[in-house]
Image (cartoon, coloured by chain):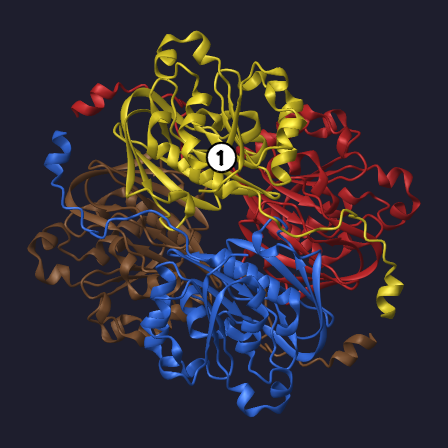
Chain colours: A yellow, B blue, C red, D brown
Amino acid sequence: MTDGLRVTIWNEGRHEQIHEAVQKVYPDGMGNTIAKGLQTYGYKTQVFTFDDPEHGLTDEVLSQTDVLTWWGHMLHNDVQDAVVDRVQKYVLNGMGLLVLHSGHESKIFKRLMGTTCDLKWREATDTERIWVSDPGHPIADGIGDFIELPQEEMYGEPFYIPTPDHQIFISWFEGGEVFRSGATWTRGRGKIFYFRPGHETYPTYHNPQVIKVIANGIKWAAPNPGASISVERHRKVPIETLKAK
Amino acid sequence: MTDGLRVTIWNEGRHEQIHEAVQKVYPDGMGNTIAKGLQTYGYKTQVFTFDDPEHGLTDEVLSQTDVLTWWGHMLHNDVQDAVVDRVQKYVLNGMGLLVLHSGHESKIFKRLMGTTCDLKWREATDTERIWVSDPGHPIADGIGDFIELPQEEMYGEPFYIPTPDHQIFISWFEGGEVFRSGATWTRGRGKIFYFRPGHETYPTYHNPQVIKVIANGIKWAAPNPGASISVERHRKVPIETLKAK
Amino acid sequence: MTDGLRVTIWNEGRHEQIHEAVQKVYPDGMGNTIAKGLQTYGYKTQVFTFDDPEHGLTDEVLSQTDVLTWWGHMLHNDVQDAVVDRVQKYVLNGMGLLVLHSGHESKIFKRLMGTTCDLKWREATDTERIWVSDPGHPIADGIGDFIELPQEEMYGEPFYIPTPDHQIFISWFEGGEVFRSGATWTRGRGKIFYFRPGHETYPTYHNPQVIKVIANGIKWAAPNPGASISVERHRKVPIETLKAK
Amino acid sequence: MTDGLRVTIWNEGRHEQIHEAVQKVYPDGMGNTIAKGLQTYGYKTQVFTFDDPEHGLTDEVLSQTDVLTWWGHMLHNDVQDAVVDRVQKYVLNGMGLLVLHSGHESKIFKRLMGTTCDLKWREATDTERIWVSDPGHPIADGIGDFIELPQEEMYGEPFYIPTPDHQIFISWFEGGEVFRSGATWTRGRGKIFYFRPGHETYPTYHNPQVIKVIANGIKWAAPNPGASISVERHRKVPIETLKAK
């Protein structure tokens, strides 16, 4: 229990408006389903979607956010650049970020990684096994050898990301592929966790183990106090003074 | 306050027996000085030295230890291999380890790193400035731009260590050298933090900022719950069964 | 000797037009000075500046470039975004990139790092010692314990970069600061090397050891053949076929 | 073609003496099969086994070795500690090391990693697909999306290794597991590459793509000139002199 962390759940929300298959699985929207799943973890959650003004990610909201989760897909390119700039700024200053599933191609993830974040994929009925590769990492807390999802979209290597700081999960797909499913990076003071599963037509975010990993990721990515670095970048101390010391 | 972490402070303890200069600075021993410094942090500390049976690091003690700190120098080669084996086993299973100053050449640190852990050094009266290079890391909590120690032994690069996971502090020495003073690694489930300052003839462990970093390091290195991996390594499932699924 | 590598040297070139102090040190421009220094290494060099059409970095030029070096300062924000997009694309596809000195705040470096790449600084007459921290790395080939520059601008930690893959040089400054002066990253297929020294009012690029490091960096960052990944990201193999196998 | 690299191929050689199934697949021994496979790459190879005096790994041999490959299994614990010490010393001084398949549990690999290097396993008839996760790495040169081996022993995560510097291959197994099959580390001046496939009862080392990866690994791991670090660790310069400068 990590009580009181302020979690902003961002879910594009467009599939739920236009695709019947998605409405069936997520009648309340994916964002609200994740929020509901997190209820037992004691976080303070709020949910925003693409259609909210400024996509819901105003300075007022972000300044009150410890960890932001991001699920997007259809509208990646329509997300406003000013909002991406703002989210990046908050991450670099310490706000945690969880990037979920197709969020791998979001502007914000590509911005923070510096790469294409591209991958292979197949919409099918692959069984996915998400194996733990770093059992000691707190994000794997409460998981066994693996999480098995009976049906998921396949994502395959190469995943064009910078070398992660920590590689926590690796997925196996029935059709013959593998994928680095859970990995972390640090950018500035911000901690970032990418977690793969979550295709919109499968009930992945109803799975308690998937929610457990997201809950663990939020706890891990929460800001922590660090060093108090002087705001003044320009050190004006005259070198003569320094030499004279 | 991270209450109740069980911290075992290991200090070789030989300099204090035979060197007057060290006795003056650490009349209670370096280990007890560190323990005293940590009192306000709410940890449960116990102190052992080389002369304790099995150097104090029995299974009984280690199984009740969340984080072990290690300061050694004169007697590195006399530490029993069976004890080194045992400490390594506990670290790989999740016990945190803080390696302090000349502990860089201890058997246990070299064992976990796989390298010589060698470096340059000079006993002099260098001023040391320990700069924060990763301000967002919890080990830098409460520190400013740097910690300044008026006199310390110099350690210089190259420091023959594997690339650290995270580089938190880098030292500047008056005589012209630099050193990676604070760095972390993960080995198995165990978290390891090396922190440079602490020459036995200087009052470094009386410095509250140095103690603050050690306290932060203990908190960071404490074991956390992770995944429950099956004990059975040999997966005997017949492939025919697997294929038939 | 790594003969025939095609090296494009990009130097903003504005200081040389308007600052007498810079003209004195680099009468031929910094770019041409670097090119001249590299002559003995057998590379094919060409030099471009900000004022060239598309800053000189057209598809025609980049498609014929193995490694690009980048020095900029005054005009970072005026570099065209389309050119930054293009350079990033070439780097991700394998073109090497050397970012020099104040290039740390260039759009292209920030784009590839995902962070602010901010740092502390002081224009003064600091002596700089650039220590080797990774003696086995080919970029340190031919260097001794350190390179000493009698006068340089100071750059200090924290340097807001992602954890480097390899940390090759760390600088000491007379005024009391340290800096991660030489570090490498991989982004996509591209190798990136940041090398700190090179303030425009000091003769740093006339120093043969500095040029040696740049020459080593070029050799290291040169593209190498890798895997032939299928262009098709969408793996359409029907899962039924896969299961039937 | 990287002509003339001196490659020492170490193969335990005991299975070939006592197991008929292995003799059928490797009538000349696994070491000689690898050596034969490498013939077209222009290396100077020599092969040693456990039964050679000092396991063949004398100072005379190692001082003339650029890269050592290591395959062992049955006799890990019988390898002489003095030889392990010696090999480690050569690696830290720059000799490349390729650890193959069951070599993951060799004394030398565990010594250099500092961890158990443990994993899951199953002897069966799993198809293995070795996917490229880092297409730009020279070790993946000439490989496509993946290498497929019709039958191999399964190795599964978690693989208890320190975070690799570079993650080049990840394996998929028909039975449902994944494994970090190709990864690199640097220890001292030495480069280390672990490559998974190579069970003694399967013709893996007759596969030209597997041999290609080994050849690439040898080229990558070959020593390169680096910095000339002073032998003298103790910097005796009096601080007074330093201050007076």
Relative to C75, say whether C29 is above or below.
below
**In which quadrant is the C terminus of chain D drawn?**
bottom right
Q: In this orientation, which residue lies closer to the viewer: D233 or A32?
A: A32
Q: In this orientation, which residue lies closer to the viewer: D232 or B241?
A: B241
Residue B38 found in image quarter: bottom right
Q: Which residue is mark 1?
A: A43
Q: Does dot 1 land on a helix, a strand or a loop?
A: loop
Q: Residue A119's x, y, as percent?
A: 42, 28
Chain to which mark 1 belongs: A
Q: In this orientation, which residue lies closer to the viewer: C182 or A46?
A: A46
Q: Amino acid at mark 1?
A: Tyr
Q: Residue A218's x, y, as percent?
A: 48, 38
Q: Residues within 10 Å of mark 1 (few under 14, many from 20)?
A: many
Q: Report the side of A225 relative to D162 (left or right).
A: right
Q: In this orientation, which residue lies closer to the viewer: D137 or A98?
A: A98
Q: Residue C123's x, y, as percent?
A: 84, 52
